[in-house]
Image (cartoon, grey):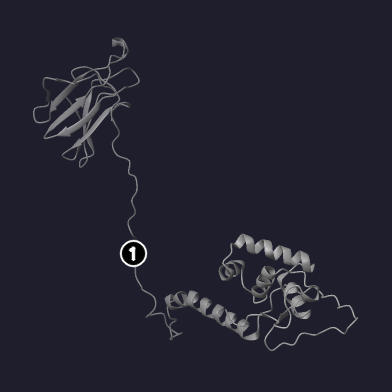
Amino acid sequence: MTDHLTLDPAITPGQDDNPLSEREMDVAQLLATGASNSEIARDLSISPGTVKVHIRNIFDKLQVSSRTEASMLLVQRGWLTVPGLTPVTPASGDAPAPVPPLDDRPARPVLWQVLWMLGALVLTMGALWTPTLLAQPAASLDLLTDAESVALGQPELEPQARWDTRTPLPQARSRLALAEWDNRLYVAGGETDAAVTDQVLAYDLESNTWEALAPLPQPLANSSAAALADHLYVAGGNTGADDGYAVRATLEVYSMADDTWLDPVNLPNPLTGAA
């Protein structure tokens, strides 16, 4: 660290009523250079906590409240000297004038700093607005015609996805089993307003028509369905109120080629409402 304040060689701690100890003068010497607590601790090989204690003792003994006041008072009384600065020695018998509190407010920015900040602001705004300005189309130079700037003819409309109403089920139902195969939707069982049904229907996506198929071996609701290799598989489900809503453990198999139901296969456990 350069430009250290140094102890006046003609004055030692303890002379001229200096209330500070030798260690406190070592701290004050570094304190006057603007060193931080960590830097003082490193230079003097002590802990930052010890530095804080010394600084508090310096403030108490000198009756000051800031580092600047302490440094100025030590220089004014000749206990510290600054290279190139001659301390003012009070006339004998005259009490030293009280040191006015110094203003700790930060210095105002100089002109070049203000100009630098304004320039940086202008460059930042320019960088933000340049892409927008470049993206704007250039105005037509010919103000008497729009032939080169306007596309004549029918506007091009982009198709948008929408819902279309298709042929509804012959009868409203819920809790049905549904599967798709070869562009056809297969609906098996479910609940109608009357009861659980065994009706099986197939919907052709191309012709938009429903076709009645061979009914389930028994009415079922809440079954799960899947289609594979021209066969429809209906797993589990439950019967209607007449049978006490019994949960089934069968896998019904339907042959699409023959429109018949094959012998069922037993599931490991009864199943209803499965996904």
Q: Residue furthest right?
A: 93
| Horizontal side of residue 187 vs 34, given as left or right | left
Looking at the image, residue 182 lies above or below residue 69: above
Q: Nearer the viewer, residue 218 or 100?
A: 100
Looking at the image, residue 82 lies above or below residue 47: below
Which residue is pictured at 73% across the width and 67% down the height?
A: 58
Quarter of the view holding residue 59: bottom right
Q: Nearer the viewer, residue 102 or 58?
A: 58
Which residue is pictured at 71% across the width and 71% down the height?
A: 67
* Amino acid type, residue under disc 1 in the picture: Glu
Identify the element where label 1 is drawn: loop
Quarter of the view holding residue 105: bottom right
Which residue is pictured at 76% across the width and 72% down the height?
A: 14
Residue identifier under label 1: 156
Q: Position of residue 236 (x, y in %)?
A: 23, 22
Q: Position of residue 182 (x, y in %)?
A: 15, 39
